Amino acid sequence: MQDKAVAKLIAAEEKRQLEGLELIPSENYVSREVLDAMGSVFTNKYSEGFPGKRYYGGQVNTDAVEQLAIDRAKALFRSDHANVQPHSGAPANEAVYHAWLEPGDTIMGMELSHGGHLTHGRPGTISAKLFNFVRYGIKDLETGEIDYQLMREVALRTKPKIILAGFSSYPRELNYAKFAEIGQEVGAVLMADMAHIAGLIAGGVLNNPFDFGFHVMTTTTHKTLRGPRGAMILSQGKVGNPLKAPDKIIENLPTLIDRTVFPGLQGGPHMHIIAAKAVALYEAAQPEYKLYCKQVLANAKTLSEELMHQGFKLVTNGTDNHMMLVDIQSTFGFDGSVAEETLDRIGLTLNKNVIPDDPLPPYRPSGIRLGTPAITTRGLKEEHMVQIAAWITRALKSHNDENELEKLSKEVKTFATAFPLPG
Ligand SMILES: *Cc1c(COP(=O)(O)O)cnc(C)c1O
């Protein structure tokens, strides 16, 4: 590479990824084939429109590759329609809101400190300025169960046009059947934001909201799904159906979504990323991927049990998925940002996170969030989770002891370099 400055940074980042263990639950390592597709000549092409209906010439290969991504996404998630063009998870959610709503309409989403994502109406976001968000949340912090009775009462009172199931920091399964029951009662579109867990749904180890009557699902493609940074919108209904009255809902939802993504929100799709999405969707349909998903859950279960065994307080006392939330403040008497910095120094990367109804501010919250998708891709198994829990415990117990942290950092580095990066 001529550009020595960037070449040096890429090499340094590769080294950092190799020598540490990635515990951020929204991250993963992609395959060589996904990297190659992202680095391909498809990046040179403008393809505004959709396969067969473009505004530029020269689309013979782009049409075919986008159609492949669409067909694979539909088959994997059992949906009638897929739009694979959203640049990332946030604009995918934005597109669904704008496809179905007018400014001032109401969306019901998860309480943010209970696990809801920023795009589910955090004050200051564009959607929070345009739409009215109402909330559901956890009833019992010891089990993580959602308060469905209160959810129904609020829904009947506020008549949301979208009920949104989904989260970025919640370690339990949602009861999609209950969401569907309430959604049908109030005539809302049922939307699932499965950004974190779409891969686990594709791999068959977590429930698919479409099996419970959901109308639309958004997901990122770079988290458990192990593809390029980007997103997709899957929906039920047929493109081209005439617009219908809201009480008949949904038949026309795919058309509205396509129009809202392009030209509503985006210009030309990123065809190199779409090619890489197609590759990731191919990989996610292989038998090895199912085994990977099973191992992600098995690793999360072991890691959470080991941490609890070491005396850590876990939010909801465990996990059903790939992630866990640890209440650092009540375990150690310091906040999650101290834990994040300490563990970063020994090569364990994770993030500070609010816990439900956190008394501390988001920048120095009580908790940390960690998960197993990336380390499972690296090839780690249950016995390694026991080791990681022990490192975390030792580091946090001696977070002021330079010598001990130095020693731990060497141990982690030696261990991690024995597990090469995929790709
Ligand atoms: C990660 C995430 C998003 C946003 O994805 P970006 O690609 O970062 O824009 C949206 N919703 C949920 C639930 C997420 O976890």
Image (tube, rainbow, N blue to C red):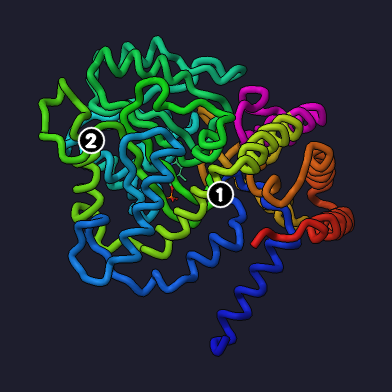
Cα separation, mark 2 vs mark 1, equals 27 Å
Labelled disc at residue 182: none
Quarter assignment of residue 18: bottom right
The x, y position of residue 402, in whole percent, is: 84, 57
Q: Identify the residue at horizontal 35%, vertical 18% (top origin).
A: 180
Q: Locate the C terminus and report the quarter of the image it occupies.
A: bottom right
Indicate left or right for 133 with 110 as reference: left
The x, y position of residue 413, in whole percent, is: 81, 59
Q: For residue 320: magenta?
A: yes
The x, y position of residue 137, in whole percent, is: 44, 22
Q: Which residue corresponds to mark 1?
A: 283
Indicate left or right for 83 with 48 as reference: right
- SS state under label 2: loop
> What amino acid is found at the position of numbered circle 2 in the picture?
Lys
Q: Identify the residue at horizontal 39%, vertical 27% (top origin).
A: 210
- SS state under label 1: helix
Q: For residue 166: magenta?
A: no
Ligand 1's image quarter is top left
Labelled disc at residue 238: 2
Quarter assignment of residue 376: top right
Q: Is residue 176 visible?
A: yes
**Frontmost residue, 295 versus 52:** 52
Q: Identify the residue at horizontal 64%, vertical 27% (top origin).
A: 319
- Of the two numbered discs 2 and 1 on the same chain, state the one appearing first in sequence: 2
Q: Which residues are magenta?
A: 305-332
Q: How many marks?
A: 2
The x, y position of residue 89, in whole percent, is: 40, 48
